Amino acid sequence: MGASLIFNLLVALVWVFLKGEFNLVNLVWGYILGAGILFLFSQIPPGKVYTKKILGFIGLAMVFLVELYKANLSVLKVVLSGNTKPPSGIVAYPLEVKSDWGITVLANLITLTPGTISMEVAPDRKTLYIHALEVDDPQDVVAGIKESFEKRVLEVFE
C-alpha cells in the first residue's frame, strides 16, 4: 500500500512537471492518472515481471500507432477511389485472450482502428465478431490482428 501511494504521488509530480505549471488542478489530474495506472497494472498476475509488462504496454501502444496510421491510409484509399461498395464483411475472430481486461483492450484497439469495428463477443468468450471495411480474405484479417494486436495484448494482460 505504501509503495502504491509513493508511486501515485510520483506520477502526480511528474505530470505537474510535464504540464509546466504547479497548481492543484494539475496535481489532481496527475494523481488520477497515477491511480489509473496502478489500477491497470494491478490486474497483472503475481509472479510476472513488472518491467516486462510495462515494456509490453509501451510496445502495444507503438504498434497501435503504426496500425492506426496504416489503417487511415487504407480507408483514405477506399474513399478516394470512389468505390461505393468495398468488399466489406463480418469476420469471426478466434480469441486467444481469456481475461476480461485483455478482451476489452483488444476489442477497443480494433474499434479505434479505422475500417474495423468490434461488434460482439460470443457468449463462450472464444470468438469476437468484427466488421471490416475491406475483407478480401477473412483469414488475412484474422492473421493481421493476431500478429499486431493480440500478440501484444497477451504479453501485457495474460
Image (cartoon, rainbow, N blue to C red):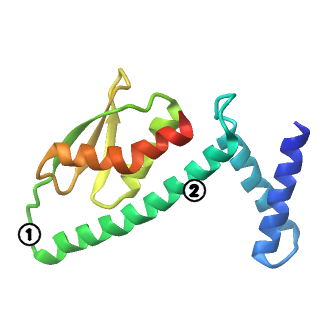
The one of 27 and 70 positioned closer to us in this rendering: 70
Q: Farthest residue to the top: give it.
A: 124
Residue at 80% x, 65% y is: 14
Amino acid at pointer 1:
Asn
Q: Residue 158, how many percent across, how many down? A: 53, 33
Left or right of 40 on screen, residue 139 = left
Residue at 68% x, 47% y is: 51
Residue at 8% x, 69% y is: 83
Q: Is residue 89 above or below residue 83?
A: above
Residue at 34% x, 26% y is: 126
How packed mark 1 is, by other alpha carbons closer than 10 Å (few <14, some 14-19, many 20 or more), is few
Distance between the alpha carbons at the discs numbered 2 and 1:
37 Å
Q: Residue 140, how many percent across, how many down? A: 19, 48
Q: Residue 88, how many percent across, how many down? A: 15, 53
The quarter of the image holding the N terminus is top right
Q: Farthest residue to the right: give it.
A: 2
Residue bearing mark 2: 58
Q: Residue 136, how many percent across, how many down? A: 11, 52
Residue bearing mark 1: 83
Q: Is residue 29 above or below residue 110?
A: below
Q: Is residue 23 above or below residue 118?
A: below
Nearer-N-terminus badge (2/1)? 2
Left or right of 94 on screen, residue 24 = right
Examine the image and state in which quarter residue 119 appears. top left
